[in-house]
Amino acid sequence: MPTNIPSTQWLCTGRSVRGASHDRSGLPNQDAIDWYPQSGSSLPLILAVSDGHGSAKSFRSDRGSQFAVRTAIEVIRKFLLVTDLNEIGDLAKSRLREQLTDQVLELTQRWQENVNLDVAAFPFTEEEKVKLLQQEGEKGLHSIHENPLLAYGATLLIVAITESSIIYLQLGDGDILRVDAHGKTTKPVARDPNLIGNETTSLCMNNAWTEFRIEVEFLDRDIPSQIPALILLSTDGYSNSYSSDEEFFKIGNNYLQEIREGGIKSIDRQLQNFLGQISSGGSGDDITLGIASRFERPASIDLPEVNPEGNNQLGDSEMTTQHPTRPRKTTSNSKWLERLVILALLLPILSICLSAYFFFELLSVKKNLTQIQTEQCQDRVQLDALKQQMEKTQEKSSKHTGQKPKQSNSNPASSPSLNPSPSLSPSPSLSPCPSPSSSPTPSSNPSPTTGSSSTSSSSSTPSSTSDSSRTEPQKK
């Protein structure tokens, strides 16, 4: 049972690379590209490309091109939301061209407003003025003071794709290429006769809106073969890298075949390096390329019949359809490749996290070991203090016990602690030697130094024997 479904869907991608000559001279990439929606996979689709001028006067053209593509997306998007583009015919095309003329006027005015706001927020620096004076002289410096928009000069190319029409808008140089299903490449917008040599129309001109070239193409969805298969927008750095337009037009069929074989994602992965090689081997200028590709799907598919009970006669696996331009195996391989890339990106992060975890764990272990060592040191100090205290106590005890026999051999009167009561104290007549407070008397063993400790300790044996005999009655 054939069932009609939408036969077309558009996909968008693009890249902008800094030119080889700009790398050598230190200039920034002065091109810009933007599209809506950012996913690049639904209608309406708006693609804008801008080329900032490379002259010395346009020293801020990299900002000017950025303002151009963003303003173009905003204005055209708003226009498509409020405009019915389902009407076809010459009258509708004429009416649409008038409406688009009003839109490019608004676009130009808004771009100029954005530039004036930028100049007010960031006035021209002395370095920019000196550099311009060296390259262009007083005349160039005067022209910037008269018209600050010159510093931001840029071209602009726009393509807006809807279900029923394609809108082409172009100001200045650059190329919009239309590639049909057979690979034939043409230019939907006629060449501007005012473009001579390196001269070009620009957004910085007073009546820039009048210089826009506008073309409208109505689409017949009943004849998909007449709908463009591919639309390319490029800055002039791309076409200037080829010796002729015929050689340059061959890129249309080349990109179409590459997309049909590998899908637009395969182009997206290679585009940055490819454009850089074109610039290095060609013009040396910045190159920007925007691609809008028509994704072809079958006009109808045979759905399985449904029985009265509502159960499908075919399994769910048999109802799936494959991408018409890319085999399922290729899609599966690309998914695995994406997963491997994600895994490769996650591995360094995981390694860093694990390293940080183990580092902090080691710090914690080291801190605990340090604390244990500190406690052990404190315990050792306390043990040493206790040991010293015990040694002192033992020393004092030993000294105390060792002095008692010496005190028993000495004069009892010299130690009051040995006289428990006055009745037991010896009489002076029984004292073998005088007390320390009494005057010296003749002794049986005289010494040159009387009263010294050495004399008392070196007393003769008979004296000691008599002392012992005299103390025995006191003990009784």
Image (spheres, rainbow, N blue to C red):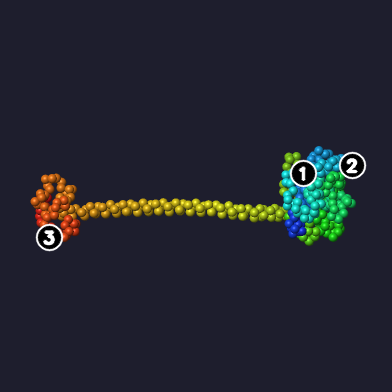
The type of residue carrying mark 1 is: Asn
Q: CA distance from mark 1 to mark 3?
A: 129 Å
In what element is the residue under mark 1? Answer: helix
Quadrant placement of the N terminus? top right
The first of marks 2 and 3 along the sequence is 2
Residue 235 is situated, as x and y percent measured from the top left of the image, at 81, 53
Q: CA distance from mark 2 to mark 3?
A: 156 Å
Q: Nearer the viewer, residue 60 or 28?
A: 60
Whichever of labels 1 and 3 marks the residue nearer the N terminus, that label is: 1
Q: Which disc number belongs to residue 94?
A: 2
N-terminal-most mark, 2 or 1: 2
Q: Residue furthest top?
A: 82
What element does badge 3 sit on?
A: loop
Residue 385 placement (x, y as % from top left): 34, 52
Of badges 1 and 3, nearer the viewer stands 3
Callout 1 crowding tier (Cα within 10 Å): few <14, some 14–19, many ≥20: some
Residue 184 visible: no
Of 215 and 52, which appears nearest the observer? 52
- Tell which residue pokes out farthest to the right in this image: 90
Q: Which residue is mark 3?
A: 445
